[in-house]
Image: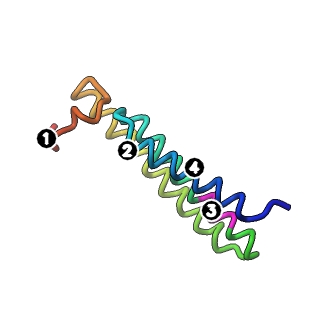
Amino acid sequence: MVPITHYLMLSAILFALGALGVLINRNIISMFMCVELMLNAVNLAFIAFSRFLNQVDGQIFVFFVMIVAAAEAAVGLALIVLFFRDKSTLDVDQANSLKW
């Protein structure tokens, strides 16, 4: 049996990579994928704690996080498409104003 610390360390590493990717990348698609990676890292931690404590609360939280991630993906990709149509680039530095 794998101890919970291995799962939590993997979750922390994935979250740190996602946060680093959001801070470093200038491409909107890459930043979007890094946010999804961070959400998956949180899901992994929820599942690890749920398994360790023999409760289903963590799995319920994962279900809701997946719903939020799906909604975020739909709205986020729609906004990215609109941004690309307007600016013809996916560089975040070009989005210096909220005006379209």
- Is 79 located above or below residue 10 in the figure? above
Amino acid residing under circle 1: Lys
Q: Secondary structure at mark 2?
A: helix
Amino acid residing under circle 2: Leu
Give the residue at mark 2.
23
| Left or right side of 5 for 71 | left
Q: Which residues are magenta?
A: 43-48
Q: Secondary structure at mark 1?
A: loop
- Is 33 located above or below residue 14 in the figure? above
Please tell me whether mark 3 or mark 2 is closer to you in this view: 2
Magenta segment's dominant SS is helix
The residue nearer to you, when weighing 14 against 87, is 14
Q: Secondary structure at mark 4?
A: helix
At which x and y percent is residue 83? 27, 34
How far apart marks 4 and 1 lie (CA) works out to 34 Å
How far apart marks 4 and 3 lie (CA) works out to 11 Å
Label placed on residue 91: none
Amino acid residing under circle 4: Leu
| Left or right side of 31 for 55 | right
At which x and y percent is residue 1? 86, 61
Give the residue at mark 1.
99
| Left or right side of 94 for 45 | right
Is the C-beta separation of discs 3 and 2 under 8 Å? no
Give the residue at mark 3.
45
How far apart marks 1 and 3 lie (CA) works out to 39 Å
The residue nearer to you, when weighing 75 against 58, is 58
Give the residue at mark 4.
14
Please tell me whether mark 1 or mark 3 is closer to you in this view: 3
